């Protein structure tokens, strides 16, 4: 009986951190729920839609299609890695390579800064977490070459991208605003 109790205590000790980490991972990945079929729509000419999955260098990425203003179309490849970072696979046209950019760090805290890629990469951005609450996180992106181009991206738990979306569909639930 005593050995059974000791084994049970050891098993709980081993399983507990793993379960706690899985709950933590779910909380942070909920900032951008990536699932085929999810979408964020302002209108018929402005939307983001998760349309599929693709293996890139052995890792599974979600294919995210965006239409902006009716004319601009963009396909992006995203995954959330084991560090709870939003990784974007970017295919370089001039060289037959793929570069992985860190677009967001969902476990970062307000004031944290990081770079999207290596210092020699022209796509590199300085990223700062400028707001973080229980259910939102907002990032500021700046170019490193002194250019004044600055943009922001914000994510809300359970909803994903924050913008003026009127129709959002996430994991089987529809939201109308």
Image: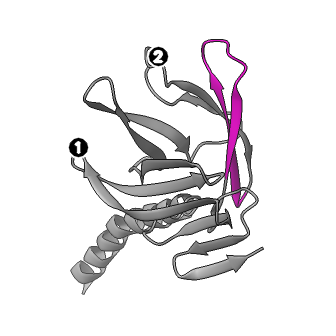
Real-space Cα distance between discs 1 and 2? 22 Å
Residue 3, compared with residue 28, is above or below; it is below
Q: Quadrant of the C terminus?
A: bottom right
Q: Is residue 86 above or below residue 159?
A: above
Q: Which residue in the structure is indicated by mark 2? A: 119
Q: Residue at x 49, y 25 (%)?
A: 123
Residue span colored magenta: 134-154
Tell me: 77 left or right of 24.
left
Is 69 displayed left or right of 38 in the figure? Answer: right
List the single residue furthest toward the bottom.
1
**Of the residues under marks 1 and 2, which one precedes in the sequence?**
1
Q: Main secondary structure of the magenta part?
A: strand
- Camera-side residue of 43 and 162: 43
**Percent of width and height locating residue 176:** 73, 77
Residue in the image at 50% along x and 31% along y = 116
Of residue 84 and residue 63, the one placed in the foreground of this image is 63
137 or 145: which is nearer to us? 145
- Could you say whether the residue bearing mark 1 is in a helix, strand or loop? loop
Image spot of residue 38 (x, y percent): 52, 70
How many C-alpha atoms fall within 10 Å of the one at disc 2: few (<14), some, or many (≥20)? Answer: few
Q: Which residue is mark 1?
A: 57
Q: Is residue 133 left or right of residue 119?
A: right
- Residue 14, percent from left and from top: 32, 65
Q: Is residue 46 above or below residue 1?
A: above
Q: Is residue 152 magenta?
A: yes
Do the residues under discs 1 and 2 have CB atoms within 8 angstroms? no
């Amino acid at each position: 009986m005593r050995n059974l109790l000791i084994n049970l205590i050891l098993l709980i000790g081993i399983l507990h951190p793993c379960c706690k980490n899985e709950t933590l991972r779910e909380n942070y990945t909920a900032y951008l729920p990536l699932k085929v079929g999810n979408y964020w729509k302002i209108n018929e000419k402005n939307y983001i839609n998760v349309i599929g999955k693709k293996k890139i260098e052995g890792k599974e990425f979600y294919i995210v299609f965006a239409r902006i203003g009716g004319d601009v179309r963009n396909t992006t490849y995203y995954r959330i890695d084991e560090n709870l970072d939003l990784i974007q696979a970017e295919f370089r046209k001039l060289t037959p390579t793929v570069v992985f950019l860190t677009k967001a760090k969902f476990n970062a805290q307000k004031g944290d800064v990081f770079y999207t890629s290596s210092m020699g990469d022209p796509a590199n951005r300085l990223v700062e977490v400028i707001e973080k609450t229980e259910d939102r996180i907002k990032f500021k992106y700046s170019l490193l070459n002194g250019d004044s181009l600055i943009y922001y991206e914000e994510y809300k738990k359970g909803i994903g991208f924050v913008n003026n979306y009127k129709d959002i569909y996430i994991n089987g639930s529809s939201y109308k605003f």
